[in-house]
Amino acid sequence: MDIIVGGFGAGVPIAWGLCLIFTVQLGHRISGSHVNPAVSIMFCIFKEISIIRCILYSIVQTAGSFVGAGMTYLVYYGKTFV
């Protein structure tokens, strides 16, 4: 059942926000919760993290995006949307 707000389903934005909050809380002590390689590169440019850490963060962040895309594909494989 989807939450209806103003005629639109609000379930997806709420779920997205909760996932983002969970990710930030989970990773704030490890990487400062920047889950985007562009942010990691920016921190490296401004000397907040080392080059090695930037490379490792970027690899893991990119791999995580592929894992998330793969999981989404598996969940919705074969389903049709109209």
Image (cartoon, grey):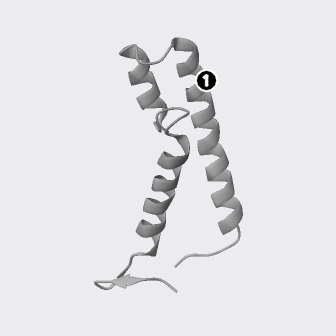
Residue appearing at x 66%, y 74% in the figure:
79
Q: Amino acid at mark 1?
A: Leu
In this rendered view, identify the residue nearer to me: 10 or 32: 32
Q: Quadrant of residue 81?
A: bottom right
Q: Is residue 56 left or right of residue 39?
A: right
Label 1: which secondary element: helix
Foreground residue among 51 and 73: 51
* Residue 57 figure quarter: top right
| 80 with respect to 8 (left or right) | right
Q: Position of residue 52 (x, y in %)?
A: 58, 14
Q: Is residue 10 left or right of residue 78?
A: left
Q: How many marks?
A: 1
Residues packed near mark 1 inside 10 Å, few (<14), some (14 to 19) or many (20 plus): some
Question: Label 1: which residue?
Answer: 56
Query: Residue lying furthest left in this view?
Result: 6
In the image, is residue 55 above or below residue 6? above
In percent of width and height, residue 44 lies at: 43, 17
Q: Position of 73 compared to 1: left or right? A: right
Query: Camera-side residue: 31 or 7?
Result: 31
Q: Residue at the far front: name it.
A: 29
Q: Position of residue 70 (x, y in %)?
A: 68, 52
Q: Which residue corresponds to the image point at 45% horizontal and 75% vertical from the top-left?
A: 11
Q: Relative to 56, does residue 36 appear above or below in the rendering?
A: below
Q: Residue 3, percent across and down?
A: 42, 83
Residue at 57% from the left image edge and 36% from the top image edge? 61
